[in-house]
């Protein structure tokens, strides 16, 4: 593989907004999410330089099995990126797995727990400091067709450790009105034909991006930040792809203030 430092004059206009990644794992996750099965693409060159604000810039040339060539630019807060061999370490790409597994285990240990309960993506708790609320919708069969049903409960976990702290009734849920509202078929239509490795990469990349968004929220970051805007836009687009459309309003129910914050910071200027 060729590695070289590229002159600034060789940068193209399409590289003016490089992709932010903060680990080799996240960089590889992005590649999986964008290009899918690694047997269909190959890294042929890496070139390194600095962005205008002094961050490392890496341009990666990708040869696709179709014969096309693609160049992707990455930037990071860390010193180096290596697409060859992502490290096996606990990092932000596994953040969502840890949070959702913790919520699922706590829900199972604290009935009533429906056997079809499926933990979804956490949002900041509206009542507890440094905590996340994990919505717990239900998967069930109706007439032989699997669907996602509105969450009866949510689990509160600590942000940072993913330690479960409690479980509560989802806002607006009425236990006398069972079953809950059916929100759509499962899996979502956007995922039915997606290669498993592309899906894996998409979730890992989303995990890292969503973790950065949550860090900004808990840090009370309100300054204008192109990185934050890009992360929020990508996170919201990816979340919409990974969930059925009917479920998306339930995130806002858990924390309307956070939902408005996302909307406000998803646009520049």
Image (cartoon, rainbow, N blue to C red):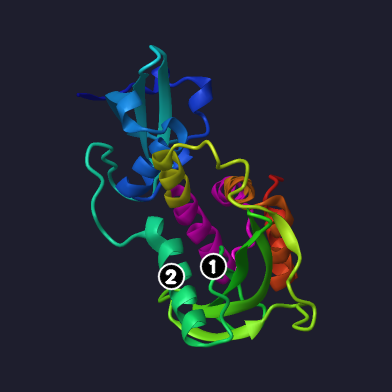
The residue drawn where x is 30% and y is 62% is 90
* Dots 1, 2 in contact, CB < 8 A: yes
Q: Quadrant of residue 175?
A: bottom right
Q: Quadrant of residue 167?
A: bottom right
Secondary structure at numbered mark 2: helix
Tell me the quadrant of the picture where the C terminus can be found: top right
Pinpoint residue 186: horizontal percent, then vertical percent. Answer: 61, 52
- Residue sitting nearer the eye, 259 or 108: 108
Q: Which residue is mark 1?
A: 119
Q: Residues within 10 Å of mark 2 (few under 14, many from 20)?
A: some
Pinpoint residue 45: horizontal percent, then vertical percent. Answer: 28, 23
In this rendering, position of residue 159 left or right of residue 184 = left
Q: Quadrant of residue 116?
A: bottom right
Q: Residues within 10 Å of mark 1 (few under 14, many from 20)?
A: many
In this rendering, position of residue 237 left or right of residue 158 = right
What residue range appears in magenta? 205-232
Single out the residue that lies furthest toward the left: 1
Q: Which residue is mark 2?
A: 101
């Amino acid at each position: 593989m060729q590695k070289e430092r590229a002159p600034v004059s060789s940068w193209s206009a399409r590289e003016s907004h490089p992709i932010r990644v903060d680990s080799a794992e996240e960089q590889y996750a992005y590649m999986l999410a964008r290009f899918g099965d690694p047997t269909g693409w190959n890294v042929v060159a890496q070139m390194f330089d600095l962005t205008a604000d002094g961050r490392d810039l890496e341009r990666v040339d990708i040869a696709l099995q179709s014969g096309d060539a693609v160049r992707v630019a990455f930037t990071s807060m860390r010193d180096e990126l290596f697409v060859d061999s992502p490290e096996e370490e606990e990092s932000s790409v596994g953040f969502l797995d840890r949070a959702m597994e913790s919520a699922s285990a706590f829900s199972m240990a604290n009935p009533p727990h429906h056997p079809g309960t499926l933990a979804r993506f956490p949002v900041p708790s509206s009542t507890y400091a440094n905590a996340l609320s994990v919505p717990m919708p239900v998967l069930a069969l109706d007439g032989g067709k699997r669907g996602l049903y509105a969450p009866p409960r949510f689990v509160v976990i600590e942000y940072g450790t993913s330690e479960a702290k409690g479980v509560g009734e989802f806002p607006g849920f009425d236990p006398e009105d069972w079953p809950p509202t059916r929100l759509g078929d499962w899996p979502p239509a956007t995922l039915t034909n997606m290669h498993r490795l592309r899906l894996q990469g998409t979730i890992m990349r989303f995990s890292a991006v969503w973790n950065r968004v949550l860090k900004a929220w808990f840090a009370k970051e309100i300054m204008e930040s192109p990185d934050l805007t890009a992360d929020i836009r990508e996170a919201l687009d990816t979340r919409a792809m990974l969930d059925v459309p009917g479920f998306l309003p339930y995130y806002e129910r858990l924390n309307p203030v956070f939902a408005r914050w996302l909307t406000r910071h998803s646009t520049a200027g």
